[in-house]
Amino acid sequence: MRAFFIVAPIALALAGCNTADRTANEVGNAADAAGAAIRDGAEDVGNTARDATEAVGNGVEGAGNVIAAAADHDGWVGRWRGVEGTYLTITKAATPGDYKLEMQYTLDDKGTFDGSSTGDGIAFQRPDGNQVLRTSTGDATGLKWLAGKKDCLKVKDGEGYCRD
C-alpha cells in the first residue's frame, strides 16, 4: 500500500509534465500557423500592389479600351420607344463611358439611373436590381408589339425599346 502512495504522486507528476509538453507543442504549432498566415497575407498584399502598378502602367491602353467601349454605346444616345407608353432616353454623362438612362420601364415605374459602359452594354442599377442594357431585335425582346423591328435595346425578356 505504501508503494501506491509513493508511485501515485510520481505518476501524476509525469502525467502533468506530459500535458504541459503537449500544450507547449500546440501553442508552438499555433504560433507557426499564425506566422505562415501573416507571411502569406503580406505576400498577397505585395501581389495586389504589383498588379495595381501594372494596371497603372497600362493605364493609357486601358483608358483607350474604355473610350472605345463608350464610343460603341454613344450611338445609343437618344430616345427609344417601348410598348404601352414605356420609353428609354439615353444621354451622355460628363465622364466618357457613363450615361444617364431616363426610363418608364413599367406602367407604374419610372426613374433616371446612372449607367456605365461595359463590354456587354450599359450596366445600371434600379430598384428591381442590377441590369444591363444590350442590343437586340424586336423579336428577341419577347414583346409582340416590337416584333419585326431591328434597331432595339433589351434589358430583359419582356422589356425592350426600339427606334424603328
Image (cartoon, rainbow, N blue to C red):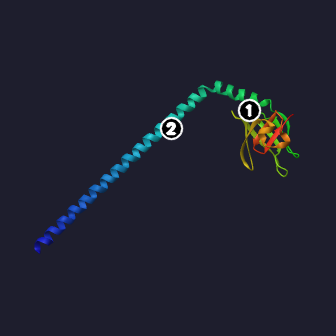
Residue lying at the far right of the rendered structure: 85
Residue 86 position (above or below residue 58): below
Could you classify mark 1 by the number of other residues whose Cα lies within 10 Å: few (under 14), some (14-19), or many (20 or more)? many
Which residue is tagged 2?
45
Eye-nearest disc, 2 or 1: 1
**Percent position of residue 25, x then y:** 30, 52
Which residue lies under the disc numbered 1?
Answer: 97
Q: Nearer the viewer, residue 29 or 99?
A: 99
Which residue shows up at 27% across the image and 59% down it? 19
Q: Quadrant of residue 58?
A: top right
Question: Tag 2, which secondary structure?
Answer: helix
Q: Position of residue 73 (x, y in %)?
A: 76, 31
Mark 1: secondary structure: loop
**Amino acid type of the residue tagged 2 in the rendering:** Val
Where is residue 34? Give x, y as percent: 41, 47
Position of 109 with respect to 1 (left or right) is right
Q: Nearer the viewer, residue 142 or 83?
A: 142
Sequence order check, earlier mark of 2 and 1: 2
Looking at the picture, how far across and down is residue 3, in whole percent? 11, 71
Q: Amino acid at mark 1?
A: Gly
Residues 44 and 115: in front is 115
Quarter placement of the N terminus: bottom left
* Residue that extends furthest to the bottom in the rendered view of this protein: 1
Apparent side of residue 72 relative to residue 41 in the rendered image (left or right): right
* 9 left or right of 60 in image: left
Q: What is the distance, in whole Å, between disc 2 and disc 1 at their CAs?
A: 30 Å
Between residues 151 and 10, which one lies in front from this camera angle? 151
> Picture quarter containing residue 4?
bottom left
**Tally of numbered discs:** 2
* Res. 143 image quadrant: top right
